[in-house]
Image (cartoon, rainbow, N blue to C red):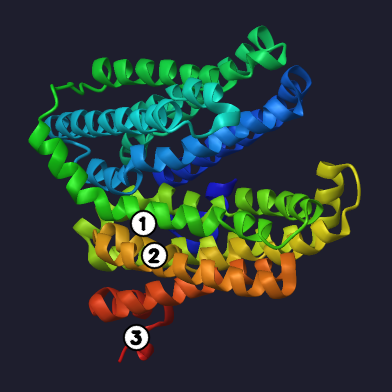
Amino acid sequence: MFDKILSSSYGNLIRSKSIQNFIFLGFIQASNILISLVSMPLLIDSIGVDQFGLVNLSLSVIILLNILVGFGYNLSAPREVAINQKNPAVLSRLVSNIISSKTILAFIAALIILIAVFGLNLFREYQVILVFSILLLFSEATIPLWFFQGLEKMKMVSVANVFSKLLYLLGIVMFIHQPDQAKWVNFILGGSGLMMNIFILIYIHHQLGIRFFKPNIHQVFESLKENILLFFSNLASHISINGGLIILSFFATAETLGMFSLAERITMVLRMLPALVIQAIYPNASKQFEKNRSGFFRFLKRAYLNGLFMGFCLSLFTYFAAPFIIQALAKSRLEDSIVYLRLLAFVPLLACLNIANVLIFLVTDRKGEMFRSSWLMCLYMVSASLVLTSKFGGVGLCYALLSTEVVIFMISTYLIYSKNKDMFHGFKTSLFGSNNHH
């Protein structure tokens, strides 16, 4: 049905492989959210609210360190795989080097945790839980999502993701029954993911003819050096998107924090839309860019307009459904949460404005511009959030987050205009017609 809508409305908007990419990436995110919602009450009943909070704190530390482990490969690797889809020798070298690089980074991240816990005595309340969470770093290191994304064959990895999450759920039901077993929660999550990843790597070796080589230290080092700006870009984006709650905690009561947190969590799920669109069409966009520049601009225009349309529909629905969403999740009508959610409802639409800019950065391999735009966004977000939150509380933070999405769009557009005028004018002409091309 989705395919028919696209073809009838916009012709050849996104080729079927890209549509499948979008659907399977959405399926992965939806299954992750669903398993999280199902596991939450089970864990609270088994280990109690206090231990559940400490498990989540440990997970937050791991998520931050996983940015180090990922090191921007989620942005650079799909492009390389897409361009070399029909070259098993290049793909074999690429897979070997990236898995090796990420595994080395996982060991470094694990060492950081061990030094922080046993050397500096940090994270005192949840040291044991955090140490047992280290397995999640190696789960991140070995997941070949980027490989299947580049091949535009997401079915296998999305099914494996669901299966690993179901294994995690089964592990909770079977082994987590009392508070002192809290340390095993993230261990089971990491273990089930790592086990599935190993099975997938065996599959791509035997079924797709990918050979694994002993890591070439020089190539690993070069690969890390090439990706360092993408790593810092990801770090800045993480702070910009997830830092609001920390800033609010300086100025607000626990009750306000709780009500804002509920609205923000919903918004963070909705904000995945532009990221899913970018990830889904990125491999095909890379191939189009290499083969046919005018075809690339047409492809980008159609993807962009559809992304904006989906963002508009999602934001509008969230705005009007806010009271029902809050009521369903909180089991009571929290007026402040409804206000926050109605304001933040427009984050997905505003984030969709930057879809084309991000794709242009990625296909042209402009790591420097991505780095600059990400850190300028981060700087603006922190400054605006501090000023507006101190004056207007949670509502001020909502406006800071909304304006951040507009500012990153303006910064990215300016950087493309100033550094890559051909791409700027090519896309502008495709979007608005030749009369606007000066």
Q: Mark 3 points at which residue?
A: 434
Q: Which amino acid does label 3 sit on?
A: Ser
Residue 294 on image: x %, y %:
27, 68
Residue at 55% x, 50% y is 272
On-image quarter of the N terminus: top right
Secondary structure under tag 1 reads: helix
Q: Do the residues labelled 2 and 1 touch (CB within 8 Å)?
A: yes
Tell which residue pokes out farthest to the right in this image: 332
| In this view, the mark in front (2 or 3) | 2
Residue at 49% x, 72% y is 380
Residue at 83% x, 60% y is 336
Residue at 47% x, 52% y is 238
Secondary structure under tag 2 reads: helix
Q: Mark 1 points at which residue?
A: 233
Q: Residues within 10 Å of mark 3 (few under 14, many from 20)?
A: few
Q: Are marks 1 and 3 in contact (CB under 8 Å)?
A: no
Residue 144 seen in the figure: no
Would you identify the image quadrant in which residue 256 lies? Answer: bottom right
Q: Are marks 2 and 3 in contact (CB under 8 Å)?
A: no
Q: What residue type is labelled 1?
A: Ser
Disc 2 and disc 1: Cα gap in Å?
7 Å
Residue 162 on image: x %, y %:
55, 25
Q: How crowded is mark 1: few (under 14 residues within 10 Å), some or many (20 or more)?
A: many
On-image quarter of the C terminus: bottom left
In the rendered structure, the answer to whether residue 104 lies left or right of residue 254 reads left
Q: Name the residue under label 2.
A: 375
Residue 251 on image: x %, y %:
70, 63
Task: Mark 2 or mark 3: name the one nearer the start of the chain.
Answer: 2
